[in-house]
Image (cartoon, rainbow, N blue to C red):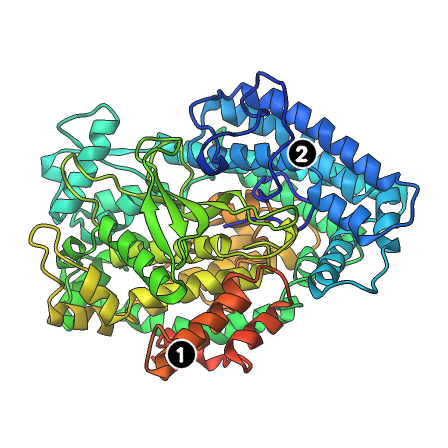
Amino acid sequence: MNRPHSAVRDASGHAAGHAAASPSSSANPLLRPWTTPHGVPPFGAFTPADFREAFDVALAEHDAEIAAIANNPGPATFDNVIAAMERAGATLTRVSGLFFNLSSADTSPELQAIERDMAPVLARHYNAIALDPALFARIQAVPETGLTPEQARLLEREKTAFRRAGAGLPPETMARLSDIAARLATLGASFAQNVLADESAWEMALDEGDLDGLPEDLRNAAAQAANERGQPGRYVITLSRSLLEPFLQFSTRRDLRARAFRAFAARGANGDAHDNRAIIAETMALRAEKARLLGYDSFAAFRLDDAMAKTPEAVAGLLHAVWEPARARALADQQALQDLFIADGHNGELEPWDWRHYAARRRRNEADFDETGLKPYLQLERMIAAAFDVARRLFGLTFRERSDLPRWRDDVRAFEVTDGNGKHVAIFYGDYFNRPSKRSGAWMSSFRSQQNLDGEVRPVVVNVMNFARPADGQPALLSFDDARTLFHEFGHALHGMLSNVTYPSLAGTSVARDFVEFPSQLYEHWLEQPQVLQTFATHWRTGEPMPEPMLRRLLDSRNEGQGFATVEYAASALVDLRLHQRTDFEGFDIDAFERQTLDDIGMPRAIIMRHRPGHFLHVFAGDGYSSAYYSYLWSEVLDADGFAAFRDSGDIFDPALARRLHDFVYAAGNLRDPREAWLGFREREADPQALLAKRGLDQAA
């Protein structure tokens, strides 16, 4: 999930949130007022070509609004500068939010062409605002006295954003920063499109003889994927995690596992037209130059200066504190899996495409836990209902499906969200199934974010997943990791839906990158609670709840595999951090850098990074998580300690704790510094040991 802060927005377009655009007489449906229920986008009423005119009109409108603010001859005030900036760009924000959500969730060659064209244009536009000397002088002149706490916070955030963009530097420096921003936007768009091209193009077609070991639900999903690709009667494995990972886990065909895994690992690095390695080298050189121009030793130092962590050294300290016990656990697990591998009659060493298969075998042997028996109890529909019910019990929310609302695909779900008094809170969209036009992964975003600047504006929020589509007439069945992902992204969605602030730039998830994962990761904990699973984990055929022994084995096994999971994540975070601490990229070879870094930290040979550089979208498709992929772990310190408060209270829905969580986190946006938000909820500092305990790494392997 990625959304930029402040009126100085980037080309991702995910900062949707201003009031509706002024009425226009244009025939373009994107420029006319959206008269749909609750003002949701008018899906079906526009074509990709409409976006070009809409962007042109919206950019010109925003330019005029900013010029009027910058050139206002009257004394600078909060209202005529900062609040005016919050009101400016409504049309552009609305059009961008729609466009970039579609370009991620349901793209097309037409949308991709527009994205390539618009990325540098939008980057230059926002940099021109951030580097406008007259505008910056107006912001600097706004009196800091007589402001509400929220206004003071917004003023501080705007000043920080402008300084970090380069405002006040010599003209030639600002011009170079603008060029860098435009080029980085182009590179980021190309990077994401290259990954999608590799993911969409690759498939492995199978016949009946190739299905050894695959459970019924995976066979059905592979058959459905084959039908969608014009190969009825066959089975297809794609590079979607929802198909690939269970295939790696269950298939007894080592040759096919190796083929699929190698394709997955090589995305964006196949030496063809979609190879991202040159993009990475140029991106890193430009980021390093940007950091130097802004007075920082490295891009990591620049990026982290405005995060909770503050310094690369603090991040490295956290990552290494987790890395060492995780590596020890993973190496012990690797030896145990190697023994199973040899016992199967194989020679040589365990490979990365073997790990999931033998880890599942080990769980069956040692813990009497077979995930093939688990999935029939984890119906997508029931897991959605579980996420909704937890929100009801914590925050009083009700979700009512609205099939009348426009949607971008027929299988997208739309819900109206209301509070305990029946008041409208938000519109929530769920886009759950994978498709070739959707980028991989799972995320939350907004078509419109919340604000109360000129009357109450409630948000339109979306969760996007990539679950395998079930065969016709069959329910979608999830792995437990899939269900956890659903809860994670729904936690982000609640952060957007419950937002209750005045100014759009402070709304919802517009918080520090290493705090934004706290609400989402915290929400995952409720999935693991027996009273939630006993109610919603029901067999799709019989309706019976998950048997007590299975539930107990599931909960007891939560920390199994944490060595593997932590190592593949932390390795990605360490490579990201070290890469952005580097300053010299002349003749840079990302493959060599990856190998050297993993050698330095002692990466177990049978595990690879969760995200290898060629497809590391978090880091290179824009800079949302650049030198900040550690954020999930930083936030995990908070979520582990935060849920301990509910657990220790004896009531996982404790009303007083839920109220503080609502007021200081989910509804509060960026009203206060993240540490103050945490203290408002937890009423003490976080305990870092809670992270190791949660992952079962607080004891020697």
Residue lying at 40% horizontally and 48% vertically, measured from the top left = 442
Name the amino acid, label 1. Ala
| Mark 1, residue position | 644
CB atoms at circles 1 and 2 under 8 Å apart? no
Residue 699, can we see it?
no
- Left or right: residue 263 versus residue 455 is left
Estimate the x, y position of residue 368 in percent, counting from the top left: 12, 69
Residue lying at 33% horizontally and 78% vertically, measured from the top left = 651
Estimate the x, y position of residue 411 in percent, counting from the top left: 30, 35
Give neighbour class at mark 1: few <14, some 14-19, many 20+ (Cα, 10 Å).
some
Instruction: Indicate the quadrant containing the C terminus: top left, top right, bottom left or bottom right.
Output: bottom left
Q: How many marks?
A: 2
Estimate the x, y position of residue 73 in percent, counting from the top left: 93, 41
Give neighbour class at mark 2: few <14, some 14-19, many 20+ (Cα, 10 Å).
many
Name the amino acid, label 2. Leu
Residue 569, can we see it?
yes
**Measured along the vertical axis of the image, is residue 625 above or below residue 276?**
below
Question: Going from the N terminus, do you reach mark 1 or mark 2 first?
Answer: 2
Residue lying at 60% horizontally and 68% vertically, measured from the top left = 674
Q: Secondary structure at mark 1?
A: helix
Depth check: 41 or 419 in front? 419
Q: Secondary structure at mark 2?
A: helix
Depth check: 134 or 402 in front? 402
Depth check: 186 or 60 in front? 60
| Mark 2, residue position | 122
Distance in Å between CA atoms under marks 1 and 2: 44 Å
**Measured along the vertical axis of the image, is residue 521 above or below residue 698?**
above
- Left or right: residue 691 versus residue 7 is left
Residue 72: assigned label: none
Quarter where residue 468 is shown: top left
